[in-house]
Structure formats: C-alpha cells, structure tokens
Amino acid sequence: MPSAGPAVETNSKGPRLAVCVEDLSKDYALGDERVVALANVSLNIEKGVFLALAGPSGSGKSTLLNMIGCIDTPSRGRVFINGQDVSGRTPDQLAGLRARTIGFVFQTFNLFPVLTAEENVEYPLHHVDEIGRRERRERVRHFLHVVGLTNYARHRPNQLSGGQRQRVAIARALVAHPEIVLADEPTANLDHRTGRNILRLMRRINRETKVTFIFSTHDPQVIRMADRRVDLEDGQIVRLGVRARSDWRYAFDRARDGDDA
Ligand SMILES: Nc1ncnc2c1ncn2[C@@H]1O[C@H](COP(=O)(O)OP(=O)(O)OP(=O)(O)O)[C@@H](O)[C@H]1O
Ligand SMILES: [Mg+2]
C-alpha cells in the first residue's frame, strides 16, 4: 500500500496513523451512467502531517476528503480514523465521531451570516455535551486569539474580509480540539497573498498543536507549503511525495514505478 510517509508499515492502523484508507472506491450513478470518482485508493496518513491533496478538477479530491470526513460513504473499501473502522456506523455515531475528531474548513467559508464571529466559532461546541459554558467561552476566546481576530469577535461575516472569514472558519474547525482538520480548497476564494497567509496560519497551528491537516488545492504555491503531497488523477493516486528540504522525494510515482507498484 502506498504510504504518505516514510517507514509506515503496510496495512498498519496503529497509533501513528490519523487516517488509513483501504482499497476505497466511490461511484456515483448519473442517469444510466456510472461515474467513478475514486477507484481503489489506499493511503496511510501519519498523525501530525500537513498534507496537500493535489490534482486536476474532477480527479476526486473532494470525494476523498468527504470519505475521510465521514460526510459521504464509500461504495467499496474502508476508512479508519485514528485506527477505528468507520464503516457500518449509524449516522448518529458518525456525527458524534465528526464532532469530536474532525474539523472542517470550506472553500466558501460556510459561516452562519446571522451569527457573530465568536458565535460561529462556538457553534460546534453545542454538539459536544460535556463542555460547559465557561469552557466554551474560554475556547472561543483562545482560538479567536490564535487566528488573530480577538478584536473582531462581535463582527458578523459580512463585516469581515474573505481572509478574516476564513480565519473564523479555522478557529471554528479547531474549537472542539479535533485530531484532524480537513480543508477543501481553503484558499480558492482568496487572493494569492491572503491565501498564502491562511496557509501559513494553518501550518503554524499544525506545528504548534500537532493537529493533522489535510487540504486540497490546485495552487502550486500552496502545495509547496505542505510536508506531504498526494496527487490524484481520474480517481487514483498517481504520486505520493514526502518533503525533503525544499524538494519532494516521491515514495510512489506511477509514472516511474508503473501501475502495479
Ligand atoms: N454527487 C455526484 N454525482 C455524480 N458525480 C459526482 C458527484 N460528486 C462528484 N462527482 C464526480 O466525481 C468525480 C470527482 O469529483 P470531485 O468533486 O471529487 O473532484 P475534485 O478533484 O474535487 O474537483 P475540483 O478540483 O473541481 O473540486 C468527477 O468526475 C465528478 O463529476
Ligand atoms: Mg473539489
């Protein structure tokens, strides 16, 4: 099985893995046709990595993120999050797992327009019963500070710039102390410089907190900031790169190793 990290045991679902994807396929029925969005994808993702999913439009990036995030179910194959097989779980169980383990960041920010920045950040904590009001307030304050928005707590999304909205979304993704943050094209709606700053912020948080970040992007500048890269084409992994100083070392490269490597 290709692995997005050095020296990860084949098939290991051990404590070092945030995500293990086994022979995952996803088909969509479109009228009489069957669209293959992912075909037999296997991948190990170590805890704490900052991983870019790259590939052309339609290559399956969002589909793979949705499977890892348990917001869509595979046609075949399995997904393990923190060593736990998530297949066969009820929607309620999956919602519980998502609320505690996974934070999401979206291309279009997906903030509630009627809520202030602090209310948006607090929102996921309403799904985690054991966190009391005081702890909630403290976390919201902390994560607004982490993303540099302490002075914007009472602003509504339409009173914030795109970059600031995405910062709110990042604070919201972190507030439940997830193990993994999934971000589908988090910089696509931002200008280049703002996008780069958002990525720098995500990378700083990744280094300081060891939260695993998995994000999709088309932007070569953004890919350059990752320490792992997974390249998809037509629903298949074609390359797995590990950062080696300023360059990539390819643990797997279909063009080099052949289809059955
Ligand atoms: N709900 C759906 N119904 C039918 N086909 C779908 C559905 N969702 C995705 N697909 C198809 O699956 C394939 C992979 O789509 P996906 O959205 O994962 O690509 P992507 O790499 O995220 O592309 P982009 O860079 O444009 O966001 C595409 O061919 C797409 O048309
Ligand atoms: Mg997509």
Image (cartoon, rainbow, N blue to C red):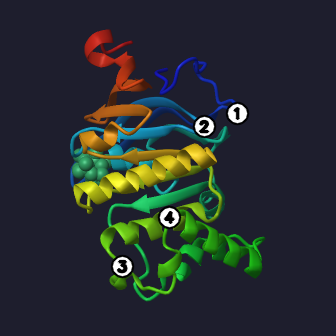
Q: CA distance from mark 4 to mark 3?
A: 13 Å
Front position in the image: 215 or 203: 203
Mark 4 Cα-neighbour bin, 10 Å: few <14, some 14–19, many ≥20: some
Question: Sequence order check: which comes first, mark 4 or mark 2?
Answer: 2
Mark 1 Cα-neighbour bin, 10 Å: few <14, some 14–19, many ≥20: few
Q: CA distance from mark 2 to mark 1?
A: 8 Å
Front position in the image: 1 or 109: 109
Q: Amino acid at mark 4?
A: Val
Q: Which residue is mark 4?
A: 147
Question: Sequence order check: which comes first, mark 2 or mark 3?
Answer: 2
Q: What is the x, y in percent for residue 182?
A: 47, 52
Q: Amino acid at mark 1?
A: Pro
Do labels 2 and 1 touch, CB within 8 Å? yes
Q: Nearer the viewer, mark 4 or mark 2?
A: 4
Q: Amino acid at mark 3?
A: Leu
Q: CA distance from mark 4 to mark 2?
A: 22 Å
Residue located 26% across and 38% down the image? 55
Query: Which image quadrant for residue 247?
Result: top left
Can you see residue 87? no
Label 2: which secondary element? loop
Q: CA distance from mark 1 to mark 4?
A: 29 Å
**Image height check: is 37 above or below 250?**
below
Question: Sequence order check: which comes first, mark 2 or mark 1?
Answer: 1
Mark 2 Cα-neighbour bin, 10 Å: few <14, some 14–19, many ≥20: some
Numbered tag placed on residue 160 in the rendering: 3
Question: Sequence order check: which comes first, mark 1 or mark 4?
Answer: 1
Numbered tag placed on residue 15 in the rendering: 1
